[in-house]
């Protein structure tokens, strides 16, 4: 493979000046090829030996690839659009490692062709996910709901490129990894789109935010992992590790070095190594050649300024930047209160990110007054010591920070193989669950326990939620009749429109002990200047205009779709937020035998709700159905399971509750 000139490498944009140091030039793997026919022959040869083939897209240096290979797959194709990373991948894996832009339709067509010819069984990757314009979201959603493929003349958002590769290849298994934020926008737009599309293709889908330390990674690092198996095969998540690997467990055997130290011999230079001590360290050294047993490569880091070294000397893992003497603070403490961070040797490392390529002060060695070396950062990401990185140190740090920890890839890959081999049926899908809930909700509309869920306007939702929360069924029925007939919009309280209406509302509310709530309703109408159009925006805009709580504003947006439901902000869309009320979480917990109401409701909870409402035409009504179900049937005490539309697919108990039939 042709090597880049030094000048060309320096021109590559990192956003920061490259750290001086040896430029590692990694040759391609002995079974690497750029020829399609040789690639197909290579894949066929592997398959003849019983190998299970995989492809890794947006592969970076190959952390996920390495983990999958350790699990039993053979990664024959990797693709990324970062030169140093793809050369690292080409060095460590046979087959093809290509520097292609997967937003281009032609590149997608090429990888689909390669995967199909090779007989790839698993497609994996971590596509970057960008925000979308309101028009873009509307168009994407229409295609997802309609089961339409992407037009061939359009550049893709990268997550859609990944999905279209799956559509073209239809492998037995799919693994998608990303940051948890992918699932935390109000609509969970990307994740629900992906799940809906994969289910349309016949895959069962499981997704979870995982703490990587539970799988042997020595750092605080959360990742969203989605696994899809074709023919509705059930995926069983891997068991969590019994041991917690600390920073010192991971790097305590590596020799002391000064900040800025460089070995003789450039890229071939090494530091003397005396041997591993812990089980983790032995695993990191297990693939090192016997001739290199006393050597450790890439154990280099940045030079340390004298004033920074003095500051590091005064720090423990508990020291904040603002705790330092003023003479050792080079930055504003009110802005950079966590500018320096010494790692705690007896705990997990903070998340290793690509930021380490720009600033190592978040990663100060627990015992030495310097930042981490390339090899130490690689260890904390679970890259073994024989795994090297192409390019200068800055490129290595960036590749390490962007990588999927190989140990996580190993755990997921092994679970995928086990699930494929057992081939158990996954049961009801998200689409089927949503369709069942929506059908039930549609039939129940005339007799809802919360009749305002069929309101004509968002104002009616707001009034009913403010006045009737926790009210008895008889009170709710009587008050809703008045709201439905008289309070279509806040303009009903406008001066001169119906001056007696406000007095009637207050009198009725006083009779049920809710006078203050009625007065609040009237005050909100006044703040809106008696205009219902102020409620046509997103829930966030409604909250700003009215001071409503998240729950009421979100429900108003969910229950009543308006023509102008797009937010004024280009990168937001309203219309269907994912609600995580106590009642909804209770339904999700019981249905899935998953304690989501006892964990982080904004991650585990929202993922669980999304698994029941889908993203197709049924999703809005299914979501309202979960609210009605929680309020009328799936009650906190003595739920009426015999009347539940999901009873045949429900896990029912799982947590020792008494479930009535």
Image (spheres, grey):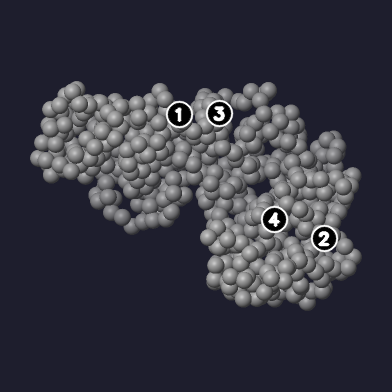
Above-or-below relation of 571 to 343: above
Above-or-below relation of 649 to 336: above
Q: Residues within 10 Å of mark 2 (few under 14, many from 20)?
A: many
Q: Would you name the residue on which mark 4 appears?
A: 358
Assign a secondary structure to mark 3. helix
Above-or-below relation of 597 to 120: below
Quarter holding the C terminus is top left
Q: Earlier in the sequence, mark 2 or mark 3?
A: 2
Q: Earlier in the sequence, mark 2 or mark 1?
A: 2
Q: Would you name the residue on which mark 1 appears?
A: 566
Q: Would you name the residue on which mark 2 appears?
A: 21
Residues under labels 1 and 3: Cα distance?
A: 12 Å
Is 635 left or right of 341, judged from the image as shown? left
Q: Position of residue 60 (x, y in %)?
A: 72, 48
Q: Position of residue 294 (x, y in %)?
A: 82, 73
* Residue ID at (80%, 42%): 96
Q: Earlier in the sequence, mark 2 or mark 4?
A: 2
Residues under labels 2 and 3: Cα distance?
A: 44 Å
Give the quadrant of residue 647.
top left
Residues under labels 3 and 4: Cα distance?
A: 33 Å
Assign a secondary structure to mark 2. loop
Q: Position of residue 480 (x, y in %)?
A: 19, 32
Closer to us: 582 or 594? 582
Q: Earlier in the sequence, mark 1 or mark 3?
A: 3
Q: Would you name the residue on which mark 3 appears?
A: 136
């Amino acid at each position: 493979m042709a090597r880049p000139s030094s000048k060309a490498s320096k021109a590559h944009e990192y956003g920061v000046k490259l750290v001086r140091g040896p430029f590692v030039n990694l040759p391609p793997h002995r079974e690497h090829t750029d020829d399609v026919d040789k690639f197909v022959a290579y894949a066929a040869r592997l398959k003849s030996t019983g190998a299970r083939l995989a492809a890794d897209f947006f592969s970076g240096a190959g952390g996920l690839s390495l983990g999958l290979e350790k699990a039993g797959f053979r990664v024959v194709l990797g693709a990324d659009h970062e030169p140093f990373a793809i050369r690292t991948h080409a060095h460590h894996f046979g087959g093809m490692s290509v520097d292609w832009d997967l937003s281009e339709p032609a590149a997608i067509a090429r990888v689909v062709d390669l995967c199909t010819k090779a007989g790839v069984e698993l497609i994996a990757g971590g596509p970057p996910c960008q925000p979308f314009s309101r028009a873009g979201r509307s168009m994407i959603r229409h295609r997802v709901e309609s089961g339409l493929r992407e037009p061939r003349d359009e550049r893709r958002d990268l997550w859609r490129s990944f999905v279209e590769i799956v559509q073209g290849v239809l492998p037995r298994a799919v693994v998608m990894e990303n940051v948890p934020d992918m699932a935390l926008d109000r609509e969970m737009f990307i994740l629900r789109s992906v799940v809906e599309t994969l289910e349309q293709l016949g895959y069962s889908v499981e997704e979870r935010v995982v703490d990587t330390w539970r799988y042997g990674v020595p750092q605080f690092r959360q990742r969203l992992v989605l696994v899809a198996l074709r023919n509705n095969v059930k995926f069983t998540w891997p068991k969590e590790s019994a041991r917690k690997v600390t920073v010192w467990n991971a790097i305590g055997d590596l020799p002391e070095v000064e900040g800025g130290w460089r070995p003789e011999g450039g890229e071939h230079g090494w530091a003397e190594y005396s041997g591993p001590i812990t089980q983790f360290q032995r695993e990191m050294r297990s693939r090192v050649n016997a001739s290199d047993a006393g050597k450790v490569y890439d154990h280099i880091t940045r030079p340390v300024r004298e004033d920074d070294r003095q500051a590091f000397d005064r720090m423990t893992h508990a020291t904040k930047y603002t705790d330092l003497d003023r003479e050792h603070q080079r930055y504003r403490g009110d802005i950079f209160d966590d500018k320096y961070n010494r790692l705690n040797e007896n705990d997990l490392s903070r998340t290793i990110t690509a930021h380490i390529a720009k600033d190592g002060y978040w990663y100060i060695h627990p015992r030495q007054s310097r930042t981490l070396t390339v090899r130490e950062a690689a260890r904390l990401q679970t890259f073994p010591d024989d795994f090297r990185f192409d390019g200068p140190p800055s490129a290595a740090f960036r590749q390490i920070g962007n990588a999927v920890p190989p140990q996580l890839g190993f755990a997921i890959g092994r679970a995928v193989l086990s699930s494929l081999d057992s081939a158990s049926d996954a049961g009801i899908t998200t689409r089927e669950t949503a369709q069942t809930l929506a059908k039930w909700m549609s039939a129940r509309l005339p007799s809802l326990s919360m009749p305002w869920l069929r309101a004509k306007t968002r104002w009616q939702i707001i009034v009913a939620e403010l006045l009737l929360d926790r009210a008895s069924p008889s009170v709710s029925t009587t008050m809703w009749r008045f709201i439905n007939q008289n309070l279509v919009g806040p303009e009903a309280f406008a001066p001169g429109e119906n001056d007696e209406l406000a007095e009637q509302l207050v009198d009725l509310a006083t009779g049920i002990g809710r006078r203050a709530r009625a007065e609040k309703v009237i005050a909100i109408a006044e703040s809106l200047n008696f205009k219902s159009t102020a409620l046509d925006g997103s829930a966030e805009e409604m909250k700003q205009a009215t001071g409503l709580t998240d729950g009421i504003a979100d429900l108003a947006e969910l229950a009543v779709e308006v023509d102008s439901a797009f937010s004024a902000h280009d990168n937001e869309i309203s219309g269907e937020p994912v609600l995580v009320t106590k009642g909804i979480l209770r339904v999700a917990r019981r249905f899935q035998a998953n304690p989501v109401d006892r964990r982080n409701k904004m991650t585990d909870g929202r993922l669980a709700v999304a698994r029941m409402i889908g993203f197709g035409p049924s999703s809005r009504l299914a979501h309202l159905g979960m609210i009605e179900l929680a309020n009328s049937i799936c009650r906190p005490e003595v739920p009426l399971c015999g009347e539940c539309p999901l009873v045949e697919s429900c896990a029912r108990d799982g947590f020792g509750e008494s479930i009535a039939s």
